[in-house]
Amino acid sequence: MLRPRARVRFAVCVSNAGCEDLQVWKLYKVLPDRAAAKEDHLRVVDESGEDYLYPASRFVLVEIPKPAADKLLGTAAVASA
């Protein structure tokens, strides 16, 4: 049986102090990572196009309706995998 695909999550960067890989106020795709969440981190696809762990305090998670998220994932407006 196929599992339903997890909903794609997004976060806005609110702080990039000491981290040039992130742009403040940019929307980033967040990948699921339970181990990272336990350590208060998010796995984010950054400017390089790769996913890395960042402190969750650098971001605010945002709810985006699925139709809008689908469009965002199809554009360069979001760092995507």
Image (cartoon, rainbow, N blue to C red):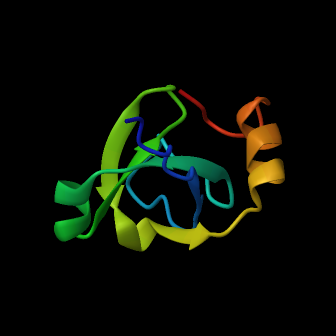
Q: Which part of the image, by quadrant, shows the N terminus?
A: top left
Query: Residue drawn 73% across and 63% down?
Result: 64
What residue is rendered at 63% in x and 69% in y? 62
Q: Residue furthest front?
A: 1
**Image height of 26 relative to 76, above or below:** below
Q: Is residue 73 left or right of residue 51?
A: right
Determine the residue positioned at 43% across, 61% down. Answer: 17
Residue appearing at x 77%, y 29% in the figure: 74
Q: Quadrant of residue 36?
A: bottom left
Residue 23 x, y percent position in the rendering: 60, 50
Residue 79 vs residue 64: left or right? Answer: left
79 vs 58, nearest the viewer? 79
**What x and y, as percent, mark residue 63?**
67, 69
- Position of residue 49 relative to residue 37, above or below, is above
Q: Is residue 43 left or right of residue 79?
A: left
Q: Quadrant of residue 10?
A: bottom right
Tag count in the figure? 0
